[in-house]
Amino acid sequence: MPLMEQRVLGRTGRNVSVVGLGTWQLGADWGDVREEDALAVLDAAVDDGVTFFDTADVYGDGRSEQLIGRYLRDRPDAGIVVATKMGRRVDQLPENYVLDNFRAWNDRSRRNLGVDTLDLVQLHCPPSSVYSSDAVYDALDTLVAEKRIAAYGVSVETCAEALTAIARPGTASVQIILNPFRLKPLEEVLPAAAEAGVGIIARVPLASGLLSGKYTKDTVFTADDHRTYNRHGEAFDQGETFSGVDYGTGVEAAAEFAALAPEGATPAGTALRWIIQQPGVTSVIPGARSAEQARANAAAAALDPLPQVTLDAVRDLYDRRIRAQVHHRW
C-alpha cells in the first residue's frame, strides 16, 4: 500500500492517515449508493493509503457500520482504525445519555462492525449540556473499563462544546467542522486540543461538496439528499449542510476559492490540503460516493503545502463572504 503521512489520534495513541474516509454517504442522506459501489469506495481509499474510517450507528440505520464490518472481514490486515458515533438513535434529551443506553448502542455497533472492542466511540452531537455532565464521562470511562470501547471522543457542532470536552482528561479526540468556509475552530479549539494532547478530526471538509467548485445555483440534489431537505436546519443542525452557508453565497464563494487552487490541483484537493496543514489537525474525513472520489481525496495528502499567499487569500475570502453568516453561531 502507498505510504501516507500518519499522525497520532490524540489520546487513543493510534496512528491514522492524515486523509481518512467519512462514510455518511455509504449509509444515507446523500442519495442511494449501491453496496458494490460502497465497498469499492472503501477499497479505493485503503489502496491509496487511508487507514482511518469514520462512521456512525445512525448512518443508514447501521448500514454504513455493516458495510465497514464486511470490508474488515475481507481485509483483516488493512490496519484500519474505525471511529463510530452514538447518541442519535433516541430523542435528543440529556436524560437519554446514560450508561444503559451507551451499552446497548455499543453492543449494536460491535455487532455491525464485527469487533469485540470499538476503536473509538464519539458522542454524536448531543445536547450541549451533555458535554458538561460528570455522569456522562463516568459512563464513558466505564465502557473503556469494560473493554467495550478502547477510547472515546466527541463530535460537536460548536467551538464552545469542543472546548468543554477538551477539558475532560478522558477525551481522546474532538470531531469538528473545519474547512475554508469554517475558520472559527482555528482561534481557540485547535490550540487547546494541541496543548491537551487531544486529536482533531476535521469533518464536512468540502462544505457538503461546495468547495469542489462543481455546483451552480441551478444544481438540483435528489429529494433524499440532505442538501435538499436540510438547507435551513429542518432535519438537524443547519451547520451540517453546506457548513451553514447560504447556498447562493456558497456557490459564489466557492468559485472564488476555486481560483486559488495551485496548478495541477483541484479545488477539492486544495481545500483538503488547507485543512491538513492547519496546526493541530490529526485527520480530515471527506466522504466519497465513488472509488474515483475516494482516490482523488487521498491524493490531497501528497500535494505540496499551500504557500502563505494562498492561506492569506483563504482568510480574506472567509472574512468578506462567509464570516457574517457562520462565525457567531458555531
Image (spheres, rainbow, N blue to C red):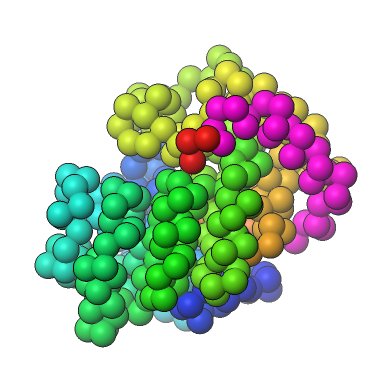
Whether residue 73 is visible to the viewer of this picture, yes or no, is no
Residue 147, given in percent of the width and then of the height, sits at 26, 83
* Residue for point 75% across, 39% down: 314
Residue 209, given in percent of the width and then of the height, sits at 56, 36
Q: Identify the main secondary structure in magenta.
A: helix
Q: Which residues are magenta?
A: 299-327
Whether residue 207 is visible to the viewer of this picture, yes or no, is yes
Q: Quadrant of residue 108?
A: bottom left
Residue 152, given in percent of the width and then of the height, sits at 36, 70
Name the foreground residue: 25 vs 126: 126
Q: Quadrant of residue 95?
A: bottom left
Q: Is residue 4 above or below residue 146?
A: above
Residue placed furthest toward the left: 100
Name the foreground residue: 6 vs 238: 238
* Residue for point 33% across, 49% down: 128
Name the foreground residue: 60 vs 43: 60
